[in-house]
Amino acid sequence: MAQAPENYALLCDYMDALGVDAKAAARAMAAAPAAAKNAALRKAANAIRVRSRQILAVNAEELAAASTKGVQPAFIDRMALDASRIESIAKALEEIAALDDPVGKVIASWSRPNGLEIARVRTPIGVIAVIYESRPNVTVDAAAIAIKAGNVVILRGGSECIRTSKALFDCFAEAMAAAGLPQGAAQFVETTDRAAVGALLSGLGGRIDLVIPRGGKSLVARVQSEARAPVLSHLDGICHVYVDRDADLRKAVEVTVNSKMRRTGVCGAAETLLIDKSVAELFWPAAVAALREKGCELRGDAAVRNLDPSVAKASEEDWHTEYLAPILSVAIVDGVDGAIAHIAKYSSGHTESIITENAATADAFIACVDSAIILHNASTQFADGGEFGLGAEIGIATGRLHARGPVGVEELTTYKNVVRGTGQVRL
């Protein structure tokens, strides 16, 4: 692996060397046996468990430094590791190892009248650059998913927790080598110089096949603007919960509170609550009591404030805001059509949930709301690759091409068309 530059003058050479090593490893990784990839993931899980104390010590130092700098609590929460989160990272590796290998899987096949047999077969994308902020677990999740799908990955983590990310990556890299996978298949950008991001976005001389940003709006915007390779990204998680007139109100309170307050700093946290006007008076007392008991600040539209004057006024900006904090915007709407209209106007296309016992209403909501994840009678906090059974995820894709929702192993493959004949020629 290339050594990190000691000064800016060496940065371009350093980044170019990462690209050269990655491209050289790509062909071997595309043909890597499933057993070797799975062995690497399991060895990495074991190494992370063995070194958990060292990793947590490094993380504690970086958390203290971030707190001193005044980093926002939501970002500190994303940076933070504890014994439970370390175990979750290790378990995710084992879950990914247990998944079927997607490489070589036949997606569809058919025969032509001339005897040609055609198949679409999953194949790796190639060299993937993952640029992320705050979350050290992304280091392992992204590397594991990319490698399982036969790709090569270059990781560039956030400066606030680069040492934690590097400690996790070292476990992964050593496991890769022990399993006999090619050097350069997984690489970590060790410099915090922002110019390294620019180098990745340049495509490293055409060696990058896909760029995946995982972070805030400014990072995603920069990647989308500057990348010279295809981008797979997600926008803000402006997620909605809609309580319908036919909702079980006890269930609705529990789902609403969990959607907002389980972890406020994740992209699947609800940021807006929509309530059908016909049940607002019945639902409100229990909902507001449960939310405020958890420390949630409420901001409402005029109808909400008429119902409860203690609620702060929601501005137009509030409906567009991903708070990542214990703040919830609330609006009273005219039935499911009103909820759909509000979501169409303000949603970022991430995750929405409807709480109703009316199957027809749920089906209408699911059909008309164009977001990557739609839930019925369940918390928006399930917007997570692990909860989908994918082992882990790189992010939630909110675009309309290639992948939508949790980006797991299969989402990091493409396909090729394999045509088998017996000597046919075209007339």
Image: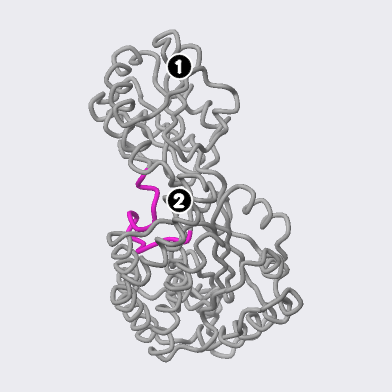
Position of residue 396 relative to residue 108, above or below, is above
* Residue 88 lies in the magenta-colored region: no
User: Which residue of the protein is positioned furthest toward the top in this rendering?
Assistant: 306
Name the residue: 45% across, 63% down: 136
The rendered magenta stretch, by its main secondary structure, is classed as loop
Instruction: Give the quadrant of the C terminus.
Output: bottom right
The residue depicted at 31 percent of the width and 28 percent of the height is: 356
- Highlighted magenta segment, given as a residue range: 381-394
Which one is earlier in the sequence, the residue at label 1 or at label 2?
2
Lateral position of residue 176 relative to residue 184, left or right = left
Q: Residue at x 29, y 14 (%)?
A: 282
Which one is in front, 147 or 375? 147
- Look at label 1 and name its amino acid: Asp
Q: Secondary structure at mark 1?
A: loop
Q: Residue 34 is drawn in which quadrant?
A: bottom left
| 125 left or right, relative to 104 | right
User: Which of labels 1 and 2 is toward the front?
Assistant: 2
